[in-house]
Image (cartoon, helix red, strand yellow):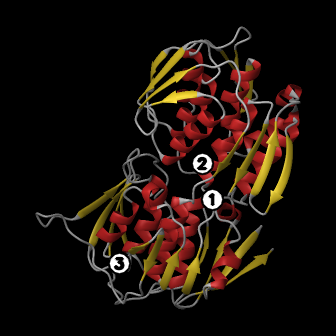
Amino acid sequence: MASFKIEGGHKLNGIITPQGAKNEALQIVCAVLLTSQKITINNVPDIIDVNKLIFILGELGVKIEKLGPNSYSFQADEINLNYLESPEFKRDGSSLRGSIMIVGPLLARFGKGYIPRPGGDKIGRRRLDTHFEGFINLGAKFRYNREEYFYGVEAPDGLVGTDMLLDEASVTGTANILMAAVLAKGTTTIYNAACEPYIQQLSKMLNSMGAKISGVGSNLLTIEGVKVLGGCEHRVLPDMIEIGSWIGMAAMTQSELTIKDVSWKNLGQIPDVFRKLGINLEKKGDDIYIPSQDSYEIQNYIDGSVLTVADAPWPGFTPDLLSIVLVVATQAKGTVLIHQKMFESRLFFVDKLIDMGAKVILCDPHRATVIGHNRQSQLKATKMTSPDIRAGISLLIAALSAKGTSIIHNIEQIDRGYERIVERLKAIGAKIERIED
């Protein structure tokens, strides 16, 4: 187990370039299983979750070549399906939630897909019903081994297109069903589909491989099944969650930062939500420039009532950035209500912020009220443990702004989502080091 040692209270300055989007990469890498032809993917983030998934594909028999620091080629022309029922797969797959998305491509191409109950963040229940109900609608048979927590779907005669209404606009569920439907016989419609940029990117990639998907960017996707898909080259978008993290870090540390090549058109409400917190940020080409600010004031609603920042399916505000917004609000002027609708355990990290001197009232598992210090009182350094990726980066931001030296344990959680974070933060002036236990 490793830890971060952070000396807080230093302003940062410089340029930082976001990594490739973690959530997109997990989907895109699974899609290579849909064809026997070579696929090249660029801007793949070098992080634990993506690397674990690439390892699983290698164990499945996918030929993987690293072309550069963030570029790979994949060729799934000799798949070893026996690996899916091995003890090794049950161990490897259970450690990564993103492994669920290999099931759709395997089911579509080979008529069967299996997965152990996946792990991931401890942020509350994250059910898989949407995925498997979609496969069942396409004609697959579902089975579940309760003793081993092992899921399976089989369709030896192939999948058949159908109309379906998803019970929730699940991003990974939509991706999985979409990848299954592209090789199904006939036409499939997916209503209440997620329409995040990740899904749009996956759809564009699949279409470039020969799929016939229309309605991209909407919540109604229409897929005309094809018999075979070919190879392609794809570039992963910059990670909007990391971009939001750097915006929050600049505000909390009173730093002047430029975030390069952010793909503004795919940021949705992220810039506007930070502006509502009083943070100045400017669009310069495809970059974000954040000037150093001594203070920032939370906007109230027009009628004077307290601002609420809540998550919602795209194009609503992403739940992955609510932890960042909460931390940033601790030093703002004013009050904000944070409403985390999707995961009931994601706000439980606020006890660490309270220990650091933040004024946060946890109303219930889904809501927290933050009364900002307006820089009148600096957060105090402390020792803490990262519970998940996004809470982890939020605590890191708090530590960078705090007075004194903080220690964050369980930083593997942060490594799961942020590439070379110590090296990149040091380059803009952060006092941070990794301590190996």
Residue 108, visible in the rendered structure: yes
Q: Is residue 298 left or right of residue 83?
A: left
**Quadrant position of residue 94:** top right
**Foreground residue, 110 or 404?**
110
Position of 150 with respect to 333 (left or right) is: right
- The residue sitting at 72% across, 31% down in the picture is 230
Residue under label 3, please give it: 280
Whether the residues at callouts 1 and 2 have beta carbons within 8 Å, the answer is yes
Q: Are marks 3 and 2 in contact (CB under 8 Å)?
A: no
Residue 311 position, x and y percent, is 38, 51
Q: Amino acid at mark 1?
A: Gly
Q: Residue furthest left?
A: 303
Sequence-first disc among 1 and 3: 1
Point out residue 143 in the picture as x, y percentages from the top left corner.
68, 17
- Give the residue type that dot 2 points to: Glu
**Where 90 sits versus 21, above or below?**
above
User: Residue tagged by mark 1?
Assistant: 20
Tell me how far mark 1 sits from mark 3, CA to CA.
25 Å
Specify few, some or many for label 1: CA neighbours under 10 Å numbering under 14, 14-19, or 20 or more: many
Q: Secondary structure at mark 1?
A: loop
Question: In the rendered picture of this protein, how many numbered marks are placed on residues?
Answer: 3
Instruction: Kindly identify which residue carries mark 2.
Output: 24
- The percent position of residue 265, horizontal first and vertical second, equals 43, 57
